[in-house]
Amino acid sequence: MSVVGVSLNERDFVPTAELVEALEVEATAFGRQMGELGCRPVRQYVPAEDGEVRRVRGYLVEQIRAAIDEINTDPGPA
């Protein structure tokens, strides 16, 4: 499964910055919408391009999948 070029099959965590960039959305609004879908950001350590390990905020893939499922099954306003 992928979200606009972000592969969700090979990892358990996706940094918020990566999701925001791939989806081309504003970060604050994205965070608010994810919260409305029951997704809470977490902090994890990830390797950076320069080889350093950095602590970044992001979302667990299982929560992203659950949000996608909810959006896809929600019939919307009646």
Image (cartoon, rainbow, N blue to C red):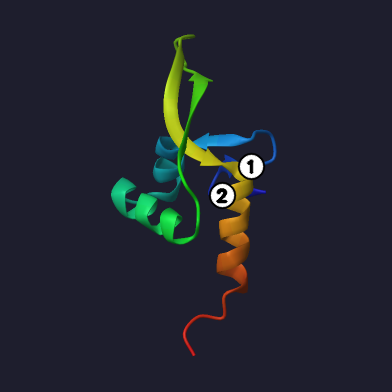
Of the image marks 2 and 1, the number of the one nearer the N terminus: 2
The residue sitting at the bottom extreme is: 78
Please state which of residues 55 and 10 is positioned toward the viewer in this rendering.
55
Q: Which residue is mark 1?
A: 8
Q: Is residue 46 left or right of residue 65?
A: left
Q: Are marks 2 and 1 in contact (CB under 8 Å)?
A: yes
Please name the amino acid that badge 1 sits on: Leu
Q: Residue at x 59, y 66 (%)?
A: 70
Describe the element under mark 2 as helix, strand or loop. strand
Circle 2 Cα neighbour tier, 10 Å, few/some/many (<14 / 14–19 / ≥20) = few
Please name the amino acid that badge 2 sits on: Val
Q: Which of the 4 image quadrants contains residue 17?
A: top left
Q: Residue at x 44, y 10 (%)?
A: 50
Residue 8 position within the rendered picture, expressed as x and y whole percent measured from the top left: 63, 42
Q: Which mark is residue 3?
A: 2
**In the rendered image of this protein, does residue 18 appear above or below residue 51?**
below
Residue 28 position within the rendered picture, expressed as x and y whole percent measured from the top left: 30, 49
Image label count = 2
Q: Is residue 49 left or right of residue 10?
A: left
